[in-house]
Image (spheres, coloured by chain):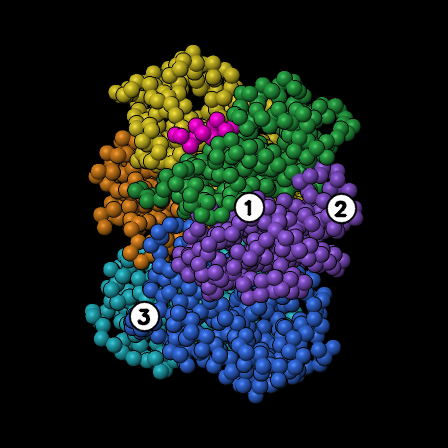
Chain colours: A purple, B green, C yellow, D orange, E blue, F cyan
Amino acid sequence: MRLQLVTWPDVEQYLKTSTGIIIPIGSTEQHGPNGLVGTDALTAEFIAHGVGEKTGALVAPTISVGMAQHHLGFPGSITLRPSTLIAVVRDNIQSLMRHGFTRFFFINGHGGNIATVTAAFSEIYAERSLQRGSNAPSVKCKLRNWWEGSGSRALSRDLYGNQEGSHATPSEVSLTFYMHPQTEKQVPMEPEVAPNGSFSDADDYRSTFPDGRIGSNPNLSTAAHGRRIYEMAVEEVARDYLAFVAR
Amino acid sequence: MRLQLVTWPDVEQYLKTSTGIIIPIGSTEQHGPNGLVGTDALTAEFIAHGVGEKTGALVAPTISVGMAQHHLGFPGSITLRPSTLIAVVRDNIQSLMRHGFTRFFFINGHGGNIATVTAAFSEIYAERSLQRGSNAPSVKCKLRNWWEGSGSRALSRDLYGNQEGSHATPSEVSLTFYMHPQTEKQVPMEPEVAPNGSFSDADDYRSTFPDGRIGSNPNLSTAAHGRRIYEMAVEEVARDYLAFVAR
Amino acid sequence: MRLQLVTWPDVEQYLKTSTGIIIPIGSTEQHGPNGLVGTDALTAEFIAHGVGEKTGALVAPTISVGMAQHHLGFPGSITLRPSTLIAVVRDNIQSLMRHGFTRFFFINGHGGNIATVTAAFSEIYAERSLQRGSNAPSVKCKLRNWWEGSGSRALSRDLYGNQEGSHATPSEVSLTFYMHPQTEKQVPMEPEVAPNGSFSDADDYRSTFPDGRIGSNPNLSTAAHGRRIYEMAVEEVARDYLAFVAR
Amino acid sequence: MRLQLVTWPDVEQYLKTSTGIIIPIGSTEQHGPNGLVGTDALTAEFIAHGVGEKTGALVAPTISVGMAQHHLGFPGSITLRPSTLIAVVRDNIQSLMRHGFTRFFFINGHGGNIATVTAAFSEIYAERSLQRGSNAPSVKCKLRNWWEGSGSRALSRDLYGNQEGSHATPSEVSLTFYMHPQTEKQVPMEPEVAPNGSFSDADDYRSTFPDGRIGSNPNLSTAAHGRRIYEMAVEEVARDYLAFVAR
Amino acid sequence: MRLQLVTWPDVEQYLKTSTGIIIPIGSTEQHGPNGLVGTDALTAEFIAHGVGEKTGALVAPTISVGMAQHHLGFPGSITLRPSTLIAVVRDNIQSLMRHGFTRFFFINGHGGNIATVTAAFSEIYAERSLQRGSNAPSVKCKLRNWWEGSGSRALSRDLYGNQEGSHATPSEVSLTFYMHPQTEKQVPMEPEVAPNGSFSDADDYRSTFPDGRIGSNPNLSTAAHGRRIYEMAVEEVARDYLAFVAR
Amino acid sequence: MRLQLVTWPDVEQYLKTSTGIIIPIGSTEQHGPNGLVGTDALTAEFIAHGVGEKTGALVAPTISVGMAQHHLGFPGSITLRPSTLIAVVRDNIQSLMRHGFTRFFFINGHGGNIATVTAAFSEIYAERSLQRGSNAPSVKCKLRNWWEGSGSRALSRDLYGNQEGSHATPSEVSLTFYMHPQTEKQVPMEPEVAPNGSFSDADDYRSTFPDGRIGSNPNLSTAAHGRRIYEMAVEEVARDYLAFVAR
């Protein structure tokens, strides 16, 4: 159930049976020579909608721009400063708390969001923690990277072995090919498998990873893989969502 | 051309011929008994994509949550505080400035965003204005409400006369019915045409407008109207975009 | 009744009969070759005091520096960043709420303040809207540009026709000549009527409007006009204030 | 020379001979049973205008609301949070730096502003200090309480001895009686001379100082005293201003 | 070499041979029935000083209060909000950048700091990333938890097996007993090994972990263990520091 | 009783008899040719621990980095922006308020902190002052410079006469020699007694005071003096602490 596609009386009805909600969060950033700039938001949203259908959970609009400062050396990348993203997460959650939601399950498509979103949760918790006997509602927030289930990890290992890498991975690119088949393409990449390494700011990133990939070979990606990856992720994330709201 | 669906080399190519970009911005808030919570983001995005196709402009991801504090009395509504939204707009623009974009055309679906987004533009301009001989690039930003063209106004007047109102209008609801035909429905509303008036905070809004509408009769909405409204808006907004980037 | 000129027991007394207060807000910015840098604050304050006398309303100190980033290309202009002005408006209102004031009527002398002050009102409302069952008082805020009444518009049209323009207008300059007759002067301006147009930051403004005026011919200004403009504005704004607090 | 009463070409001319400017800063807060709520802003502004006339210095608009959180227990008092006031001082100074001003002389009417304005100066300096080889202009800021000259201190001692106190002092009240003779009055006060002591927040202040005064007997105030106090302060502060800009 | 114990000419000298610096960061929070409130800051500082001696690295003052909102249910715990800690880390780094430091190695004693400090690094990097051709220096920051080396992990496994847990661990408590032998003590704990689990805010934490421990049995701690843990950590962290500055 | 060296049950016990706490605050900044970069934090902490022992007061961890923007021209100096330091002080106090502490006694080692910490106290008070009938606890905060007692002043006058100066004073340097005898040394300084004067930003400071001292001759410092200075300060500050918590 997508929040954007229902009416407020529908939400009022939903809250009678559940106070959980899913919030997809991604990023808008380069994904190498053949990966889409929207990969992280598109995949998080796609899987979130799948989980919503499977579990009946309400799915909020996607936060499409995340923390991607290191990608700014490549045209099209957009970042929120961490301090801005913290405010965005806080305002989303506080708005929904107002209506009675208490369980916030973020389905994440971008590793670069993890630290900042986790800090944002602490910022929210801190407001209540700092007041003895606060009458603010007690809430729980969780960030779930869509690729983290054991099944998802096994599948990517089976499909791509040590060519999965950590940015512009064939897994995420396959997912976007499955979603948008017209974007499927292979392009020459040199070297075939990108180098690994660490990075700090955008210049540093671009000089270390000149075409944007880290450790990956996204030319292995196919829409058919994407479908399998999608189904596995939806199944595993749905299970985690249900466990989260059941606590 | 949707930024999310292209690669960074595509963006690099695009920048050789244009430094303009479209950013859809909407809201996530109640739209009366039969209007969708996502109306303002969905319509802004839909029209932005149409304008992008017509003009070849690049379209950034939609800012789906805007300034909607007054709607928080109705479940499902989400707001950013104005100060948060200012930071979001600033970070989006500054990221894109980094790549060489200089013309930012926001297609807006929500009246409640106008003041804050306009203030955000001034916040960005101010950084450069406060430094004599700044070497920051000079940029221009514009907010365009999709419904403001003379053709759009005439069309809504023809279709709905004085039952258009100002929130949960039959025009915007028709647009969403056109986009998502499965959501089209009429529901009993009392009175048929909602009252007009002003409001301050969420409690005040809800007590003045108990079902969320202002001055409108969204039971007049149809998907067929939506199509005409869409085509008119795309045509007029595209014209304005082209004039804006030509300056 | 000017807040600055009364004692706290006077304010305590006032609050027994009214919870409304007027806050003049202007700007400190160039007003063309013969207009005063203080025009927008001086006029807002002058009319506010007139309205205060006519209605018995309490008038707070003037916010003399507003949002004027676009005027910084001209010496003497001062701006608050929008984020700063939002904080200023918020602190003024929250202080007065503490005493029991609930109706805040801003008399504005500067178009550039409108978006930011409106955003500030939303920032204040949002704090209450975000908390279900908040026990914070419900307040209402209104921004009234002194020149917006139908009588004021008709008068400026009669006096100046299409030479009124939108910055350094003969209306506002006449008002300051009426207040400070020693400042009345005509100076050569070329062209006689300034160009119209849009602007973004300070450099852009100055290159488009080299002497600071927009669309106006302030050499038409006289102190005698100023008196008529003043009287009309006070009458119309006073009427609006009374309607506002009566709601 | 009041900035509000001149044109931008006048300021341009002024900057050819001086880069100094005076900024009056006061407060809006209770001043006991017969003192005006505007005392601190009115007196700072009055003396600043006197200094401006004597020295030819440009005088910016008065910052009329300062840091007065401890007075909020009395109706009519308004405060900026320290963080807001820091932003206000920063924006004023940065705007004027843009035009070439380098010496900022704040004439202060309120002890409660000292810490925060001093912190604001450091916030401004810090921006330049944090960048090695910054090309931002080097500026100097000074806060001068109008009552601090040796002559002013001697005069208040002569006039009021140990009944001067530290809030709602007969000196400052006399000044306002001189400026606004119609406000001169004595009212019963019990005890005649208010108690001394320290305070923290507004409730604490009001319970310690029930009528708002600290250590003072403002029934000694007269307009005639006010004139002498004014003349002494203008003379001493003018001397300090000239020394400041000469450095 | 402790920064606090040298003079500025010593630092000037140091910068001729190295631009790396170590910053210890800990927390001030409950550590169960027999663990010290200062555990995380004391251990980080102790190991940092050891690493400084071994490598000749300069060691900055310890950030003793970190992000510990979840511990506020226990007296003595102090937290910085994440947004505050981000500002603290930023100001420390920017100050040191001014002098020419470019490698910032944080030795961390508290898991709750990881997300926020990582976000702070991104906030710093973002400022440079957002400006094309920025002339700000390129810097690298790293957070190293003292317990993360393979030798440290093996040692704690050998000493405590599955009674190490994740808060108020026997490892960290042993370290503090080694540093401050007079604090060594065993106290009755029920159950012997604390439960495991997750937590959100302070109330939630305290109700899940009533005596403050998570999964640990700190009654196994001894000063003798502490010495072995210290030596292992210093050796491994020193190696990592040298590798970091060598890059 | 050092907070870092006790357990949470110890703090719980302490709160049954006292709600006062001591917070040492210093700075990390150059202290001339032979003074330690950590002087202000080391001395504040040292005296705070002495006061804690004498009075039984709990002593929180030291805030080692303060407001020192003007020292950034000398390697090793670190500053917090005033706005950051305000947030740090606020978070420390609000955390401790949560546990029931109500009297916050800051022992300060650095003149540059005074304005900002005082502003921070007002920021905290303001939150309560702005809400009529707030149910937040009423607290009191005090900043005590360790050198301000009449005995301390007399002692430094006796020992150093007019060579005490105001930065890198022989008094504070003696204190650090007493604490860390291995750091005691004399170095050539030219002139023997440093010049006096004022300063604004870091460049201005360094050009006015080339070796970092202001008005002082720290070559007079000895560890033996340090002991006498320490004992006097502890005695006087302890007396002030007891008076503060007794109010």
Left/right placement of residue B64 relative to residue D79 reads: right
List the residue tagged with mark 3. E15
List the residue tagged with mark 2. A15
Badge 1 and badge 2 both on one subunit: yes
Quadrant of the image for the C terminus of chain A?
Answer: bottom right
- Give me the chain letter of mark 1: A
Tell me the CA gap for discs 3 and 2.
Answer: 61 Å
Residue B234: horizontal and vertical position, in percent? 55, 28
| Marks 1 & 2, CB-CB < 8 Å contact | no
Q: Earlier in the sequence, mark 1 or mark 2?
A: 2
Secondary structure found at label 3: loop
Q: Nearer the viewer, residue F210 or E228?
A: E228
Q: Nearer the viewer, residue E53 or F177?
A: E53
Badge 3 and badge 2 both on one subunit: no
Circle 2 residues within 10 Å: few <14, some 14–19, many ≥20: some
> Quadrant of the rendered structure where residue C183 is?
top left
Residue A41: horizontal and vertical position, in percent? 58, 49
Residue extending furthest toward the top: C158
Q: How many marks?
A: 3
Tell me the CA gap for discs 1 and 3.
Answer: 52 Å
Label 1 or label 3, whichever lies nearer to me, is 1
Residue D153: horizontal and vertical position, in percent? 34, 49
Q: Which residue is drawn at 31% across and 42% down?
A: B132
Disc 3 marks a residue whose amino acid type is Leu
Q: Nearer the viewer, residue A111 or D42?
A: A111
Circle 3 residues within 10 Å: few <14, some 14–19, many ≥20: some
| Figure check: F130 above or below E2 | above
The residues colored magenta run B237-247
Disc 1 marks a residue whose amino acid type is Thr
**Labelled disc at residue A183:** 1
